[in-house]
Every structure is written in C-alpha cells, then in structure tokens.
Image (tube, rainbow, N blue to C red):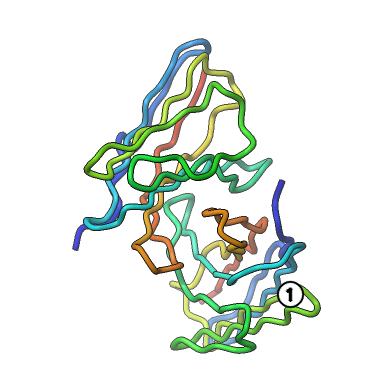
Amino acid sequence: SQQGEEDPQALSIQEGENATMNCSYKTSINNLQWYRQNSGRGLVHLILIRSNEREKHSGRLRVTLDTSKKSSSLLITASRAADTASYFCATDGSNDYKLSFGAGTTVTVRA
Amino acid sequence: KAGVTQTPRYLIKTRGQQVTLSCSPISGHRSVSWYQQTPGQGLQFLFEYFSETQRNKGNFPGRFSGRQFSNSRSEMNVSTLELGDSALYLCASRSDGSYGYTFGSGTRLTVV
C-alpha cells in the first residue's frame, strides 16, 4: 500500500505559469523527497526536506512541509516544456530503509 | 561518475518462466533498493540490501527474491512468472549518510 496521496492527479498549465502539487502522508517521517519521472523511465531526485524543516528551495523548486497536517507541497515556478513529467512525493520513515511513494501528479506544460 | 545501470532494459517472458534482473549501483554506494512500478499499484518497495545483507523486504510473495554481491551489484529474481508481474522494475542506490536515492532507468518486464 502507498504511504501518500497526491493532489491533483493531473495538471495542465501554460509555459511560464507556476505548478503546485500536494502530497499527504500517514505516518511519521524522517524526511520527505520529491522525484520526477519522464515517460516511464527512471526517477530523478529533485529535493529533500527533513522533518524539522518547513520550507526549502532549489532553483525553480520550492517545497513546504507541515508535519502537523502530514502534508507537503511542491511548487515549480516559471514552468518550461521540459518540466512535463510525473512528480512523486516519497516519505522516508524511521530506519526502515525504504521510500513510500505517493500515486504521483502528471504535469503537462503547454508551449 | 556513472549512474545506476540496470540490465536488460526490456524483457519479454512467458508465464511460468523465471527472470533475473541486474543492477549496478553508483561506485561507492553500498545500499541498493528495488521497486516495482505498475499502473494499478504505483511504486512499491521490493527490498533493500546493504553490504550483502537484506535489511528490509516489501509485501511481495516469496517468488520475488534478491541478493547483493560483495561489489554491491544486485540481482533480483522472479520465479514462476504471472501476468501481473508485468511492470517497470527500478533499482536505486544511495551513499552512506545520504538520504536521496539515485535511480536507474529500469527494466520493463512483460509477461505473456
């Protein structure tokens, strides 16, 4: 079973717009990570936020974490066609050496 | 630095057969994990190895097994294949003290 749920399932935006996706999870975590997947290929690690952090930035990415609500959001600013992909949140629990993935959000950026 | 290498990229097998998938992690990474991705179940954890020891196993039947060699390379085996085993199998490695994973491009297994 999956740890998290992602919302929305799919998102279509115009190039240059921002894309926001949300992730909720169920159990306590050490950290939460976001990954991108292009066309059923491997996952690419985007950003990690630790359980004691509330916000983190990396280039055009901004991630927030609210442990009281067990939720996270990923914002991609000034989107580009190359951002078209599926985005997954993944939680890393307490010393269980695994990631638990959400169902993913499919983002389509229109030129 | 070379990434995580998975072989083969594509595989077609018949029900009842067995299959072995291979994963070479990034040099120096001792932790190797395997995940199954299907449209219905999404990404599911199979197992994790560290220095030839399995530290965790996901909720999969005993037909799914794996191992890790002394050079950190890993293999996973699925015996008595079923149609439902058709999936993208992803391998990931992680360095000691790091939390982010590097994934390979995956092996797409089709069972007919």
Q: Residue at x 56, y 45 (%)?
A: B45
Task: Tell which of B61 and A97 is nearer to you.
Answer: A97
The image position of residue B72, as x and y in percent, is: 28, 45
Quadrant the N terminus of chain B occupies: bottom left
Q: Describe the element under mark 1 as helix, strand or loop.
A: strand
Relative height, residue A16 to residue A30 (above, below): below
- Give the chain of mark 1: A
Q: Residue at x 48, y 54 (%)?
A: A39
Residue lying furthest left: B1
Residue lying furthest right: A69
The image position of residue A84, as x and y in percent, is: 51, 68
Snapshot quadrant of residue B41? top right
Relative height, residue A58 to residue A89 (above, below): below
Q: Which residue is mark 1?
A: A71
Task: Tell which of B73 and A33 is nearer to you.
Answer: B73
Question: Does residue A51 appear left or right of residue A67 in this picture?
Answer: left
Q: Residue at x 63, y 43 (%)?
A: B39
Question: Does residue B107 appear left or right of residue B56 in this picture?
Answer: left
Question: Does residue B12 appear left or right of residue A9 in this picture?
Answer: left
The image position of residue A16, as x and y in percent, is: 53, 87
The amino acid on which the numbered mark 1 sits, given as a three-letter code, is Ser
Relative height, residue B4 to residue A47 (above, below): above
The image position of residue A23, as x and y in percent, is: 70, 69
Total count of labels: 1
